[in-house]
Amino acid sequence: MRRDTITLTNVPKRTLIHLYKLMLRIRRFEEKIVNVYCDQDMKTPVHLYIGQEAVAAGVCANLCKEDYVFSTHRSHGHYLAKGGDMKRLMAELYGRKTGCSRGKGGSMHVVDPEAGVCGSTAIVGGNIPLSVGAALSSVMQKRKQVSISFFGDGAVDEGAFHESLNFAALKGLPVVFVCENNFYATHSHQSKRQPHDHIYKLAKHYVMPGFRVDGNDVLRVFGVARQAVSRARRGNGPTLMECRTYRWKGHVGPECDIKLGYRMQEELNSWMKRCPIKRFEKRLVNEGVMKKTTIDKITREIDLQIHDAYLFGKGSPHPDENELLEDVWNLN
Amino acid sequence: MPWTKLQADAIDHEDYLPRHDGDRRLTYREAIREAQYQALEIDPRVFILGEGVDDPGGVFGTTLDLHKKYGRERIIDLPLAENGFTGIAIGAAIAGMRPILVHMRMDFLLLSMDQIVNHASKWRYMFGGRQKVPVTIRAIIGRGWGSAAQHSQSLHGLFMHVPGLKLVMPSSAYDVKGLLLSSIADEDPVMFVEHRWLFDQGDHVPEEMYTIPMGKGRVVRKGTDVTVLAISHMVPEALKASKALEEKHRISCEIIDPRTLKPLDEKIIINSVRKTGRLVISDCGWNTGGVSGVLASLIAEKAFSHLKAPIRRVCLPDTPTPAAPALEDAFYPSARDIINAARLVMRS
C-alpha cells in the first residue's frame, strides 16, 4: 500500500474544518471535566484524552455512521469523534439515568449504538478481538462496514492483540487496528515492557500493512486512516496503524502527574509544543483556510454545546434504586 | 426473526415426562447436531466456530460434516487462541450475528475467561441494556480413560457465580435439542455445558424444532421420601440409584433436574423438598464453592422448616482429577454414592 500525500491543498476545506472541530470538541470537553471534577459530583475515574485528539479525529473523519468503533478506558475522544451524543456522555460521567449507559457504565464504559460506538472496555486489549468479531459479522452479512479498535501501547503487550491480528489477517477482515502509542502503560514506559520500539512493524508478521504515523498531526493520521479504511472497505483486509502521541494529564484523573517522577517535565513540554490542535490551527490560519475570527466563533459554539451538555448532565435525575437489577439479562 | 415464533410455540415438555415418548430416537450427540443443523438452516446469522469444528471427528460427532452443507464460511475452524476467538464471537454477536462457539474441552475455556467474564457477561448491563450479546458457548466436560486433570473438568460453578451469564446443563437428548435451540435464540450469552458421558444416551427427539424455556426444571421421576437434585450426568446416575433404592431399600426418590442453573427454577426444587422433607444434591462439579453449595443454601434459606434431615451432597472431592483407573473410581461419584447418601438422610 502506497502512502498518499495529504496536504492542506488536496483535502476539501470542509473536511479540514471538520477535523479541527472534532479535535477542539474533544479538547474543550475534557477541559470542562478538569474544571468541574473538584466539585466531586462527577464520581467516576476519568482517563483524559488531552494531547491525543488528532488520532480519534483523524481516524473517525474517515468513517460512516454504520462503521464500528470499539474503545477503551480512555474513551471520551473516540466516542465524541465517532459522533456519540455529547449530552448523554456528560450525563454518564455524572452517573445520571439519562447517561449513554444509563448510569451503569461511567467514564470507562460508554456506548452509542446509533452512532456506531459499540462500547468501551476497561480491560486493556479486550476490545481488539471484539472489533475483529464485528468485522467478521460485516463480511458474513455482506455489508461494507469497517471496524476500528483503538488501543494503547500497553495493549500490544497483551495476547489478545496478537490473537486478533492473526485472525483478522487470516480471514482478510475489514478492521483497522489503531494503536495510540503514548509511551506509557499507566506509569511504565514502553521500553520497560517491549524489546523494540516499532509496534507498527509487528504488522509484517501478520502479513498486513503497518504504518507509523505522527499521532499529533491530524492530517497525517487522516491520510493513513483513509487508505486503511478504504482498503478494508474494498475487502482487502486489515491494517495496523501506530500513532505516536502523548497524554498530557495523568493516567487517570484531571491533574498533571509530573510530580510522581516517572516522566520528566521536559518530555511533557516538548509534546505540548507539538499540540495537535495548535499546530493544525496555525497551519489553517497561515495558509488562509480559516481566519482567526472563525476559530473564535467555532470555539464559542463548541463551548456552548459543552455548557448545554453540562447543564443536561448535572441537571438530570439519578437512577432509581430499582434500576440496580435491570439489564442484567433478558428473561423473556 | 424466526426465533420469536419458535419460542412462542415452545412445546410443553411436561407431556414428555418421565422419559419422552415417541419412536424417533436420537442420541444426545445427534440431537446437538440436529439442533445446530436446523438453526443454521432457518437463520443466516447463526454460525459455528471452534477448534476442529470441521474436522473428521466433528467435535465428538456434534458438528460432523456441517461444513459440507453450510460451507466453511459458516462452520469456522479456528487458530488456538481461545481468548481472542471468544472475543471475536462476542464482537460478532454485538454486531448482530448469533455465533455458536464450541470448546471441545471445558478446560480450554479457562483461557477465555477475560472475554466471557469481563466482556460477554457485562456488555448488556454495563451499557444500560443498549447492547446485547447473543452468543452460545458450548463447553464439553470429559470423564474417564485417564483424561486426568486438564481434560475432564466440570467448571460450571465458576460461571454460575457471574451475573449476566445463563448456564444450561441438559441431561437428555430431548432436552439438549430444545435447550440448545433456546440458547441460540436467546438474547444473552449462554454457557451451554454438555457431558461426554451423556453423548450416547438415547431419547425420543421430535424432528421439528422446539425450544425449552430457560429457568424451567424437570421432574425426572416422581417420588415421596427423598428429593435427589441432580445435575447433568448425575441425572442418569440418580435414575440408576432410584431403582436400587426402591427395590432394595423401599425408599422412593423424586429426581429433579434443574436443566438450567441460571436462571434457576427454584420453585420446582422447593416444592419437591416441601413434599419429601429430605434432599440429596448431586453435581458433577467439586464440592467446595460450587453449584451444590448454592443449591443447598437456597433450601436452607427458603425451605428449612420443611427439612426432616440435614442436606447431603454427592459431588467431586476436593482434588484435581487423577489419571489411574483405580483413582478415578474413587474420585467420581456414582449411583452407589447417591444410594448411600439417600439412605443416610432417611436414617436421620
Image (spheres, coloured by chain):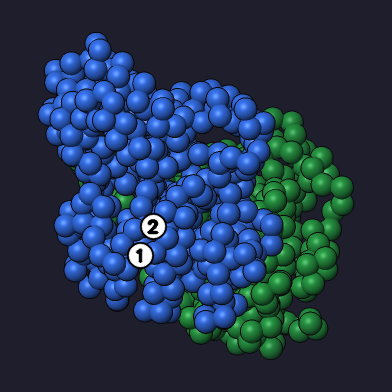
Chain colours: A green, B blue
The residue at the far front in this view is B248
In the rendered image, the vertical position of residue A101 relative to residue A39, given as above or below: below
In percent of width and height, residue A294 lies at 51, 74
> Quick one: which residue is furthest to the top in this view?
B348
Same chain for the residues under marks 1 and 2 in the image: yes
What x and y, as percent, mark residue A113? Answer: 40, 66
Residue A265 location in percent, x, y? 75, 39
Q: Residue at x 21, y 51 (%)?
A: B17
Which amino acid is tagged 1?
Arg
* B244 lies left or right of A6: left
Q: Which residue is mark 2?
A: B202
Q: Amino acid at mark 2?
A: Gly
Q: Which residue is mark 1?
A: B25
Of the pair A278 and B117, the residue shown nearer to us = B117
* Circle 1 crowding by C-alpha within 10 Å: few under 14, some 14–19, many from 20: some
* Above-or-below relation of A245 to A288: above
Q: Quadrant of the N terminus of chain A?
A: bottom right
One can see residue A56 in this view: no
Q: Which secondary structure lies at badge 2?
A: strand
Q: Quadrant of residue B327?
A: top right
As rendered, which of A218 and A124 lies closer to the eye?
A124
Looking at the picture, tell me which residue is in the foreground, B62 or B293.
B62
Q: Chain of mark 1?
A: B
Mark 1 and 2 residues: CB-CB less than 8 Å, in contact? yes
Residue A99 circle label: none
